Amino acid sequence: MDPWVAEAAAAIARPARRHLDALVAVSSPSGDVHGAEECAAVCAALLPESATVDRAECSSPGHGRDLIATIGGSGTGRLLLLGHLDTVVAHADHLPLSEPSPGLLKGSGAVDMKGGVVLALGVLRALAERPELFAEAAVLLVVDEEWRTAPFAHAPRFAGWDACLCFEAGELTADGHEGVVVRRKAAGTIRVTARGRSSHSGSAPDRGRNALLALAAAAQAIAACHDPKGPDHRSAVPTVLRSGDAFNVVPAAGELFGDVRADRDAAIRAVIDAVPEDVGGVTLIPDLIRLWPGMDAREATAPLLEAASTTLGRPIVGVPRGGASDASHMAPTIPVTVDGLGPRGGKAHNPGEFVAEESLRTRAEVALALATAALSAAG
């Protein structure tokens, strides 16, 4: 391994647990302005002294502001480090960092993706000590990744930059090699609105048009499109259903949400066509409220992974992943985009979410190897 990579990764890892503890302690569900601001303040305290901080408007109205921190150097390359501060966990369910077993750090947002944010900030601090490596390096931390339906606002700002490293959770391949994400599915959110007719559920149940039953049929229609082993590798999962206001009234309205992932946008749109227009006299209106692009950076990143593997002293392998990420929004603007540079862990979006503590060092090594290889290629 390159000696500087080993030394800098160790320096990142030493305080990483304390930094993760501070970030996870803040409950920051998407849309909560106070949580977003508090997380941004923690991150600002962990930046190198030379960083210039910009609190940019978020892509999603009503959210807190995103954080962009930039440092300048004397080299030629420009590198973006990308992450998010929001979680899917409501305040009432938030869990601070704990260690239920040795080396396992459990807490809300630990792996998705506050552990990755800790590493991104560490990489920026390491680069600040080597200004000859780059012309510009920046960290972009957004506060709406988990539930954004608006267009991503920041890609034009970084057009022409040489590489983007995104710090979603890391992984090992089946062969035990360091895995990084170079391909992602497109992601869509479908909403189905139901318009029926209310009536008394005891004295006149058949006069109503039951929106809940119609939405249940729509949920079955969406689920029937689930075909992860098919040609488009499509997953289709109904996730939220809301209908009815009283236990003794036939519900007249409601809405259903479904999460759809596939290799092609067209395969996501096809799920809308599978929703029936009418069920039992209830009108169903489906629409696509979110469509995130897919990402295929395999060809563009192949030379980078090869060079970084040499720097690291062990293989770095590009892998696919089904989950959505802001890396997909950056890849059309910065073709050399690599994701999955965060620490290893598991159970994202789950009360048992955790990070493997030892991976804070090993994944810092991977990120630094990729950063130095990307900047060397740019030079």
Image (cartoon, rainbow, N blue to C red):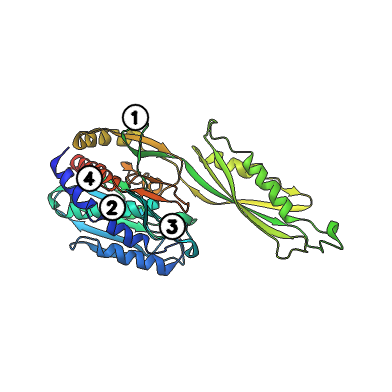
Q: Quadrant of residue 206?
A: bottom right
Q: Which residue type does callout 1 highlight? A: Asp
- Residue drawn at 26 percent across, 60 percent down: 69
Point out the frontmost of discs 1 and 2.
1
Q: Position of residue 271 (x, y in %)?
A: 61, 42
Q: For marks 3 and 4, give the CA distance.
A: 26 Å
Q: Are marks 3 and 1 in contact (CB under 8 Å)?
A: no
Residue 147 as seen in the image, left or right of residue 269: left
Q: Position of residue 205 (x, y in %)?
A: 84, 59
Task: Classify 10 Å Cα crowding around label 2: few (below 14), some (14-19), many (20 and above).
Answer: many
Label whose residue precedes the other's in the sequence (1 or 2): 2
Q: For marks 3 and 2, give the CA distance.
A: 17 Å
What residue does disc 1 label?
Answer: 175
In the rendered image of this protein, does residue 300 appear above or below residue 86? Answer: above
- Residue drawn at 30 percent across, 46 percent down: 165
Label whose residue precedes the other's in the sequence (4 or 1): 1
- Residue drawn at 26 percent across, 54 percent down: 16
Q: Which residue type does callout 3 highlight? A: Thr
Could you say whether the residue bearing mark 4 is in a helix, strand or loop? helix
Residue 368: mark: 4
Q: For marks 4 and 1, give the CA distance.
A: 22 Å
Please say whether residue 151 is visible from this viewpoint: no
Q: For marks 2 and 4, give the CA distance.
A: 10 Å
Task: Classify 10 Å Cα crowding around label 4: few (below 14), some (14-19), many (20 and above).
Answer: many
Q: Quadrant of residue 267?
A: top right
What residue does disc 2 label?
Answer: 120
What residue does disc 3 label?
Answer: 87
Could you say whether the residue bearing mark 2 is in a helix, strand or loop? helix
- Depth check: give the residue in front, 73 or 33: 33
Q: Which residue type does callout 2 highlight? A: Ala
